Amino acid sequence: MTTPESPSQARAGADLSGRTMIMSGGSRGIGEAIAVKAARAGANIALIAKTADPHPKLPGTIFTAAKAIEQAGGTALPIVGDIRDDDQLDVAVARTVEQFGGIDIVVNNASALDLTPSAEISMKRYDLMQDINARGAFSLSTKCVPHLRRSANPHILTLSPPITIAPEWFKAVPTAYTISKFAMSLVTLDWQANSTPTGSPPTRCGRAPPSRPPPSAMCSARTSSPVAAPSTSWPTRPCRSSRSPPRRPPDSALSMRRSWPPTGSPISRPTRLIRRSHNGIWSWTSGCGGHDRTAPRSDQGLVILNGVVSLNGMDPDGRPSVGARVRRARLRKGLSARGLAAALGVSPATLSQLENDKAQLTVTRLESIAAVLGVSACDILSQRGADPVTGSSTAPMASAATASGRSRSDWRKYGPLRQDPVLAAALAEFLELGYHGTTMRRIAGRSGVSVPAIYARHDSKQAILMCILDATMTDLEWRAAAALAECDDPVGRFRCLVENLALYHTYRRDLGFIGASEVRSLEPGNQAVVSARRNHQQELVDEQVRAGVAAHLFTTASPDDAARVVVSMCTALPTWWHPGGRLSPEEVAAEYVGYALNLVGCHPAGSPARAG
């Protein structure tokens, strides 16, 4: 436990330089005020919150909060995530430790608020509050404890009220919300009670429950003085006992509107509390945000039949299929396939089938995906807005030829890549040091983009790798489709597929090398998606070799083995070919087509071979 400080030290504030705070929520209101106050004291702040896009009624996002933190002198790490998702919490804690070297302070700030009376509240809203408030606080605190034990001065701060069974409380605050907030208090009290001088994290204990709870008690964070009064100096010592209340901050810091519930605020609907940080006064706005469920228009090339969403043919400009649109929307949010699958309550394999159009996408499932991603169903289907990778309207790594429109004759043409600087830097680092040897700081240094700015675009290093591989496979896939369409017979299609693979793995040798070497670095869900797309390219060659054998154009006795050798031969090109060497990409492709035809036993002229 830390040594208690004097009142004068508490008033003067504490130096939090080099200390790291992780906070749930914090995109607005009192959470943001706490983060900014800690930033002024020199702390590193990691925020995990869902608000990545501006809310129509509420100000602030996780990125505006991160900007305010940095303007206050701190270092911010914004992490878009849901504290109800264990995988996302694990990633958030790991990223915080990777970025800052440890965790010293945990702030359980995120909460869901619904003041509907007990007789009227739905169980769905009840469960939401328990999941975010009670479970979220418990899960974040528990996951951070191993790192807190290594801190010289650890703290867990929770925005929750004192526990009381006074009848007046339950007359003022509905029971469903009270249960969730009291549970948050119990989490804090548990860690405080189990703290030891040998390393368990000390916590902020709450004030003694009043005989009659003030109207502000359910809203203010009464488990710790810095939470109750974020505008006062930041103390660093835990309260020794809940029986001895901490020093009351100045009344000006706790100036509240005394009328509660707020005049004109419909209690039957979720009510959100916003803190005006410039004057320390609480203000209320009511209403809850929803997702636009407007049905897609018919001119978008989409068809909804019996509740299933599908495309009315592929658009001439090569817009992605329904599954690909879902995948791009997920990548735009920096969410892994496993994370989205867990949020939907399905297996990663099921999500992989949806994203690869192997399974039907129902309207209900589409709306569930949109809700998890925090966008509308129309945003997913119409692909409105910025590119998921670069934040621009162009592809993350696109050639000049493909950006203006793709035609069948373009598949042999390779213009210079227009690379997002972050992805270009990441690609160079992966090639030099490998995925696991690369850090976000190295990517930031090479790209000239700050670490927080990178996290504003990409949720993790894993998301960056997925963006690179997605761009690689997308480019290869349209070229393969165009190569197939150029010929009508198995020999011609086989020649074009081999030529395409050879050209791609020479002109795009860096992308090809990463595609072959770093698939093993992907998380299981992402690996399944990329592997399925790579396997599809193999299957295209398999089909043409089998067709050639069936038509007596190829004489190989092992068509599948021969096809695998051909593809492996082409994908290995990045390991030895380099620009400026003896052979140009076109010369390599011509030689490899000849090798491939020999491997499958094709007659030089392409005419039918004689049977034994």
Image (cartoon, rainbow, N blue to C red):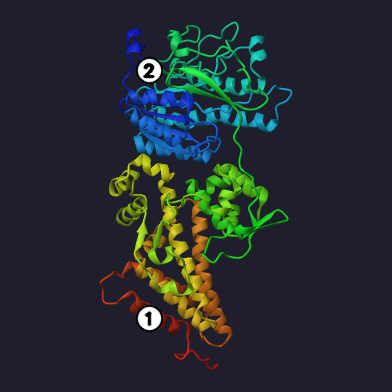
* Quadrant in which the N terminus is drawn: top left
Picture quarter containing residue 100? top left
Across and down, in percent, residue 320 comes to: 54, 60
Mark 1, other Cα within 10 Å: few <14 / some 14–19 / many ≥20: some
- Amino acid found under the numbered disc labelled 2: Trp
What secondary structure is found at the residue carrying circle 1? helix
Q: Nearer the viewer, residue 133 or 380?
A: 380
User: For mark 1, what is the residue?
Assistant: 590
Please say if 213 is above or below 328: above
Question: In the image, 159: left or right of 581?
Answer: right
- Whether tag 1 and tag 2 are in contact, CB under 8 A, the answer is no
Relative height, residue 215 to residue 25 (above, below):
above
Residue closer to the observer: 313 or 341: 313
Q: Position of residue 45 (x, y in %)?
A: 39, 30
- Is tag 1's residue or tag 2's residue first in the polypeptide sequence? 2
**Quadrant of the rendered image containing residue 6:** top left
In the depicted structure, whether residue 45 falls above or below residue 80: above
Which residue was labeled with disc 2?
234
Residue 396, how many percent across, how many down? 41, 56
Q: Secondary structure at mark 2?
A: loop
**Residue 572: x %, y % from top left:** 38, 69
